[in-house]
Structures are given as C-alpha cells and as structure tokens.
C-alpha cells in the first residue's frame, strides 16, 4: 500500500506478506470486494466497498438465544415499553452493529417487532411517515434498507 493511501480499518483490509500467500476467508459482507497486489513489497491488500463486518458463529448463537428468550418472555405481554426493557432485548442492543444482519434476517424470515432495535443500532429510520404503524410496510422498508447497506 502506498504511503499516501490511508489504511482501511480491520477487518475491511488485511495485509498479507509473501508471494505464495493466498487470501484468507474474510469476515466481511458487502457487494464489491477486490484486492491490490503491490509487486514492490510483495503484499496483497484485500478491501470491501461496504466493509460490513459479518457476525461470527458465536454472535449468531448468542443472538438466537437472546431472541428466543425475549420472544418467550414477552409473547403474551401487552406492554411494549416493558418488552423493550427486557434484559434479552437490551443485550441484543448491546451487541451493536454486529446484530444488524441477524435482526434483519430474523425480521425477513419470521417477522417480529424489531423496529426499535434496528433504529437504535443503525441510527437510521428508512420507514416513511406514511408507513408508520403498518407492520408489513415497515418490515419491507427495513429489509430493503438492509439489502441496500449490505446486511442482507
């Protein structure tokens, strides 16, 4: 990598030394991935245009455990406020952006009331005012957003 090019944050880039080194599997999701080979230094730089870190298997297991607990404990609840203050829901929020693809996948496959978690973690709201309160439309808005941002 040249001196005037700022380094990309891990795991978006990985520097490999040696002519015979092959590129490892990266833990990134994204639409465009490419590598740059520097003949002078014999290094390869792997990059992703989106750089969304993919959840690990342990992240997936943790999310599934927490999501199942949250659903089980709030299934018959009539208090949205209490549901969102549930320890399992708060733990999912604490996972941060690594949880976004997991939440979006869950929303896509099983539905659910994941909208507050998505808004808080992503700091975005792709739901237009005319879709507010319309679960099917809100779900589609978030799934579209997830695809556009490389999470699905």
Image (cartoon, rainbow, N blue to C red):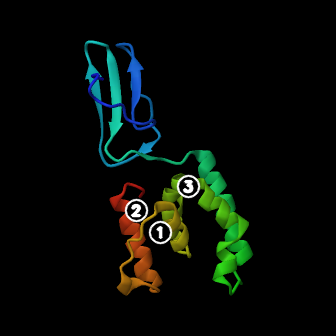
Question: How many numbered circles does the render carry?
Answer: 3
- Viewport quadrant of the N terminus: top left
Q: Label 1: how many residues lie within 10 Å, few (<14), some (14-19) or many (20+)?
A: some
Residue in the image at 64% along x and 52% along y: 61
State the residue at coordinates (51%, 73%). 115
Picture coordinates of residue 73, whole percent (x, y):
74, 74
68 lies above or below 6: below
Residue 65 against residue 133 in the figure, above or below? above
Q: Residues within 10 Å of mark 2 (few under 14, many from 20)?
A: some
Measured Cα–Cα span from mark 3 to mark 1: 19 Å
Compare marks 3 and 2 and give the one earlier in the sequence: 3
* Residue labelled with disc 1: 108
- Which badge, 1 or 2, is on the more N-terminal residue? 1
Q: Nearer the viewer, residue 83 or 68?
A: 83
Instruction: Give the structural element (helix, strand or loop) at label 1.
Output: helix
Mark 3 neighbour density, 10 Å: few (under 14) some (14–19) many (20 or more)? some
Evaluate if marks 1 and 2 touch, with contact meaning CB atoms under 8 Å apart: yes
Residue 146 is tagged as: 2
Which residue corresponds to mark 3?
A: 96
User: Looking at the picture, does residue 68 appear above or below residue 133?
Assistant: above
**Label 3 to label 2: alpha-carbon separation:** 15 Å
Q: Where does the image place residue 53, in percent across and percent down from the top left? A: 46, 46
Q: Quadrant of residue 145?
A: bottom left
- Circle 3 sits in a helix, a strand or a loop, which is it? helix
- Residue at position x 62%, y 60% in the image: 92
Which of these two is toward me, 4 or 56? 4
* Residues marked 3 and 2 touching at CB (< 8 Å): no
Considering the numbered disc 2 on the image, is that residue within a helix, a strand or a loop? helix
């Amino acid at each position: 990598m040249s001196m005037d090019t700022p380094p990309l944050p891990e795991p978006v880039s990985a520097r490999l030394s040696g002519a015979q080194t092959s590129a490892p599997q990266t833990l990134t999701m994204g639409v465009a991935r490419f590598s740059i080979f520097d003949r002078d230094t014999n290094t390869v730089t792997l990059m992703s245009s989106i750089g969304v870190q993919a959840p690990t298997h342990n992240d997936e297991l943790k999310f599934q455990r927490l999501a199942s607990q949250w659903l089980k404990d709030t299934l018959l609840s009539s208090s949205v406020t209490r549901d969102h203050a549930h320890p399992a829901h708060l733990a999912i929020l604490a996972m941060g952006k690594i949880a976004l693809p997991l939440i979006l996948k869950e929303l896509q496959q099983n539905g659910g009331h994941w909208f507050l978690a998505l808004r808080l973690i992503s700091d975005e709201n792709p739901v237009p005012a005319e879709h507010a309160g319309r679960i099917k439309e809100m779900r589609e808005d978030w799934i579209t957003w997830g695809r556009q941002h490389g999470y699905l």
